[in-house]
Image (cartoon, rainbow, N blue to C red):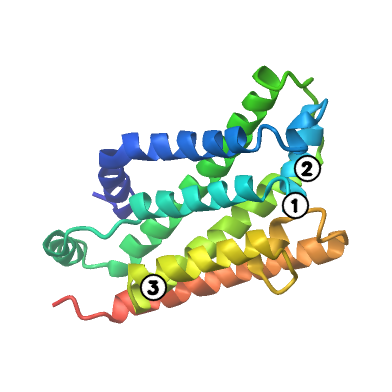
């Protein structure tokens, strides 16, 4: 069995928990922000621009819920396997690199799924509960890309901390980064660079995106190097 096939076979065990996480947290975020300025919008594109353009006093609870839900998702998708099973897994595969790459790729795919769920559920709430008119803006694509890449940047750092330290350290650091990013959206905080309104210059936004992608590659390389050199015998 290929590493990716094996990884998704194991993930299927938690399919129900993953589905609930992707549904529950975006829905709770939308409900908690339903009385905010963002949900008083007339058009759907305006709602997304207000929610995802920047963190403000009216939508910080929404962002905090989305970020917390993403941390929960990581705990499920990247949960630590049984040590005895994982030991046998590496012996059978004889390729820790491929297995780790499969886990990282699975995390990227579920990140895209989570962000898509956030957009769909928030959009559905805006259409059917707040009775907004449907409209589409091309900036939504940039918002989606920016948020997905930024979240996975945090996930890559989480995995790196997990293999070099432990998941407790990883959780504390990433939760702290998300909390500071939501409460203090400033240029030195990573979450800032998924906010389209705050990074007003398109050149800066694309530069930040490239730096994030390069950082994700670096995190993956160091993670694989650590796992590969670990003593599983």
Tell us which disc is closer to us: 3 or 1: 1
Local secondary structure at mark 3: helix
- The residue positioned 75% from the left and 52% from the top of the image is 56
Residue 21, x across and y down, in percent: 42, 40
Residue 180, how many percent across, how many down?
A: 61, 66
Mark closest to the chain's N terminus, 1 or 2: 2
Residue 84, by quadrant, is: bottom left
Q: Which mark is residue 50?
A: 2
Is 138 or 181 nearer to us in this picture? 181
Q: Earlier in the sequence, mark 3 or mark 2?
A: 2
Query: Label 2: few (<14), some or many (≥20) within 10 Å?
Result: some
User: What residue occupies the far right of the structure in this picture?
Assistant: 201
Vertical placement of residue 100 versus 21, above or below? below
Residue 153 in view (yes/no): yes
- Per the image, the residue denoted by label 1 is 56
The residue indicated by pointer 3 is: 169
> Disc number at residue 23?
none
Which of the two discs, 1 and 2, sits closer to the camera?
A: 1
Q: Compared to 51, does 232 lie above or below?
A: below
SS of the residue under disc 1: loop
Q: Residue at x 27, y 43 (%)?
A: 9
Q: SS at mark 2?
A: helix
Q: Is 14 situated above or below 148?
A: above
The reply to whether callout 1 and callout 2 are in contact (CB within 8 Å) is yes
Between residues 185 and 3, which one lies in front from this camera angle? 185
* Place of residue 38 in the rendered image (x, y in percent of width and height, measured from the top left): 76, 37
At x 77%, y 62%, the residue is 206
Mark earlier in primary sequence (3, 1): 1
Q: CA distance from mark 3 to mark 2?
A: 33 Å
């Amino acid at each position: 069995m290929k590493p990716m096939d094996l990884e998704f076979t194991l993930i299927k065990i938690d399919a129900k928990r993953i589905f609930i996480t992707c549904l529950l947290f975006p829905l709770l975020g939308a409900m908690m922000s339903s009385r905010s300025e963002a949900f008083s919008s007339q058009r759907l594109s305006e709602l997304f621009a207000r929610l995802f353009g920047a963190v403000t006093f009216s939508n910080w609870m929404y962002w905090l819920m989305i970020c917390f839900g993403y941390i929960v998702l990581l705990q499920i998708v990247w949960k630590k396997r049984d040590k005895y099973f994982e030991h046998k897994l590496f012996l059978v595969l004889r390729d820790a690199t491929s297995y780790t790459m499969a886990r990282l790729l699975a995390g990227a795919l579920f990140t895209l799924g989570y962000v898509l769920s956030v957009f769909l559920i928030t959009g559905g709430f805006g259409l059917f509960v707040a009775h907004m008119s449907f409209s589409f803006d091309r900036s939504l694509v940039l918002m989606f890309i920016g948020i997905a890449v930024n979240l996975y940047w945090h996930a890559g750092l989480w995995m790196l901390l997990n293999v070099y330290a432990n998941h407790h350290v990883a959780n504390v650091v990433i939760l702290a980064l998300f909390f500071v990013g939501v409460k203090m959206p400033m240029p030195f905080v990573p979450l800032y660079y998924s906010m389209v309104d705050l990074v007003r210059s398109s050149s800066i936004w694309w530069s930040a995106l490239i730096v994030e992608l390069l950082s994700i590659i670096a995190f993956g390389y160091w993670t694989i190097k650590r796992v590969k050199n670990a003593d599983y015998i």
